[in-house]
Every structure is written in structure tokens, then in C-alpha cells.
Image (tube, rainbow, N blue to C red):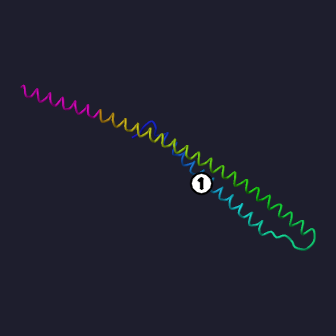
């Protein structure tokens, strides 16, 4: 049964599906960011400080540690950003779910109105048929 809300329900369902995909993508991005951060920490732990050798080895090691710490900071920012994107995606999905449900409800209400109107029309038609039949019987009974 077609209602004026059919196209809106379809549109909102499409929007809802896109929001679900965006949430999955945001979740995957967060997981990737957390994995990268974890890897950065592991690499930092693997870097050893030279116990002896030239000053150039010491400076190279220090530079390597510095770069790894910078990488960790960058990955922390990435995790924070991915977390905020995930939260935004969750909020958008919730909003889209509410909108979709609202239009589904309105569509259902419209369908119920149409069915009620059809039943009322059928009842009127049955009353008319019964009245005509009664009148025909009455006329036949009088003759």
C-alpha cells in the first residue's frame, strides 16, 4: 500500500545504511590507530641504549629514541581523532535511526488511516446493498 511517506522511509533507510557504514569505517580507523600506537610502543621498547662506543652511536641512538617518541605522540593524536570520529559516527547513526523510525511510524499511521477509510467505505457499500436488497424484497412482497 503506497503512502506519501514511502519515499521518505526509503530515503531515511538509505541514510541509515550510510551511517552504519560510516560507523564501521570509523571503528576500523580507531582500531588501526590503536594498533599503530601499540606498535610504536613496542618499537620504543626494542630500542636499546648503547653501553659503550663512540659519541656518534650515542647521538644516533638518542635521535632514534626522540623520533620514536614523536611517532608515539603522533599516533596518540591519531587515536584521539579516531575516537572522536567514532563518537560522531555513533551520534549520527542514533539520529538517523530515530528519523527512520519516526517516518516508519508515520507511514504505519497513514496505512492504518487508509485501511480504516476502506473499511468504512466497504461498510457503507454493504449497507447500500442490504438496503437495496431489502427494498427489492419489500417491493416484491407488496405485489
Q: Is residue 38 above or below residue 6?
A: below
The residue at the far left in this view is 143
Q: Which type of secondary structure does the marked residue at label 1 adopt? A: helix
Q: Nearer the viewer, residue 38 or 142?
A: 38
The secondary structure that dominates the magenta segment is helix
Q: Is residue 80 above or below residue 54?
A: above
Residue under pointer 1: 24
Residue 60 placement: quadrant: bottom right
Magenta part of the protein: which range? 121-143
Q: Does the magenta run of residues contain 106?
A: no
Residue placed at 83% from the left, 61% from the top? 66
Q: Mark 1, residues whose alpha carbon is within 10 Å: few (<14), some, or many (≥20)?
A: some
Q: Nearer the viewer, residue 114 or 91?
A: 91
Q: Nearer the viewer, residue 22 or 73?
A: 73
Residue placed at 72% from the left, 60% from the top? 37
Residue placed at 76% from the left, 59% from the top? 72
Check the picture and name the quadrant holding the C terminus: top left
Q: Does the magenta run of residues contain 125?
A: yes
Residue placed at 29% from the left, 32% from the top? 121
Position of residue 112 in the picture relative to residue 23 (left or right): left
Q: Measured from the top left, where is residue 4 in percent x and y?
A: 45, 36
Amino acid at each position: 500500500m503506497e503512502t506519501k511517506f514511502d519515499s521518505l522511509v526509503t530515503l531515511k533507510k538509505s541514510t541509515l545504511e550510510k551511517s552504519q557504514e560510516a560507523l564501521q569505517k570509523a571503528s576500523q580507523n580507531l582500531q588501526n590507530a590503536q594498533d599503530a600506537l601499540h606498535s610504536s610502543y613496542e618499537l620504543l621498547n626494542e630500542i636499546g641504549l648503547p653501553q659503550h662506543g663512540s659519541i656518534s652511536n650515542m647521538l644516533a641512538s638518542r635521535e632514534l629514541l626522540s623520533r620514536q617518541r614523536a611517532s608515539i605522540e603522533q599516533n596518540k593524536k591519531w587515536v584521539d581523532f579516531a575516537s572522536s570520529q567514532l563518537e560522531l559516527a555513533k551520534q549520527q547513526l542514533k539520529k538517523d535511526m530515530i528519523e527512520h523510525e519516526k517516518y516508519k511510524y508515520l507511514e504505519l499511521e497513514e496505512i492504518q488511516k487508509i485501511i480504516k477509510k476502506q473499511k468504512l467505505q466497504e461498510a457503507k457499500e454493504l449497507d447500500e446493498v442490504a438496503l437495496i436488497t431489502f427494498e427489492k424484497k419489500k417491493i416484491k412482497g407488496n405485489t
